[in-house]
Amino acid sequence: MINPTLRAAVKSDLTYLFETINNKEIKRLDKNSFKKSKFAKIFLNNLKSPNIFYLIAENKKQIIGFASLHIQNLLHHCGRVAEIQEIYVSPWFRYQGVGIKLLNKLIKMARLKGCVRIEVSSGTKNKKIHKFYKKHGLKKVSFKHIMVI
């Protein structure tokens, strides 16, 4: 087990996040890569939001993972709901406690921000992540349907 340092993401993390998310999504969806300029605009704008949080996990100053959390007020929960958008750990550092440290920090942040619920979606085929979330107290309660437009 390693003990990574967690910190808020900053502008200089853009390249790492772009390359990681871009590669992950290409493999998952077998699609063309994102445009870095568009990605950068979204990332830099989101850094300014009081309801979007990006965490970076580091080991000896090397980025080894990240996570993000978006918070919004939802009518159907009559309160603030936090949604985990990503939790990613570099393959060489998986199964060493990095993911749970990121998850626990996101849960703590959601509580501090007055959220009534925390949610996460994951791909239907990713059984390892389903097991991870279940092991750490998240329950499967719905299906998510999407349409690419």
Image (cartoon, rainbow, N blue to C red):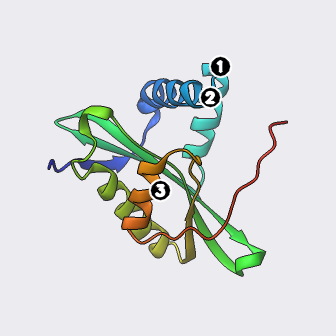
Q: Nearer the viewer's eye, disc 3 or disc 1? A: 3
- Residue 43 in picture, x, y percent from top left: 58, 37
Q: Which mark is residue 130?
A: 3
| Amino acid on which disc 3 is placed | His
Q: Judge by depth and name the residue closer to the eye, 134 or 47.
A: 134
- Quick check: marks 3 and 2 in contact, CB under 8 Å? no
Q: Which element type, helix, strand or loop, lies under badge 2?
A: helix
Cα–Cα gap, marks 3 and 1: 30 Å
- Quick check: marks 2 and 1 in contact, CB under 8 Å? yes
- Residue 42 in picture, x, y percent from top left: 64, 36
Residue shown at the point (33%, 51%) measured from the top left: 99
Q: On the picture, is 19 further left or further right than 42?
A: left
Q: Earlier in the sequence, mark 3 or mark 1?
A: 1
| Amino acid on which disc 1 is placed | Lys
Q: Which residue is mark 2?
A: 39
Indicate the quadrant containing the C terminus: top left, top right, bottom left or bottom right: top right
Residue 54 sits above or below residue 91 on the image? below
Cα–Cα gap, marks 3 and 2: 27 Å
The answer to whether residue 54 is visible is no
Q: Which mark is residue 57?
A: none
Quarter where residue 118 is shown? bottom right
Q: Earlier in the sequence, mark 3 or mark 2?
A: 2
Cα–Cα gap, marks 2 and 1: 6 Å
Q: Nearer the viewer's eye, disc 3 or disc 2? A: 3
Q: Which element type, helix, strand or loop, lies under badge 1?
A: loop
Q: Which residue is mark 1?
A: 35
Residue shown at the point (15%, 47%) measured from the top left: 2
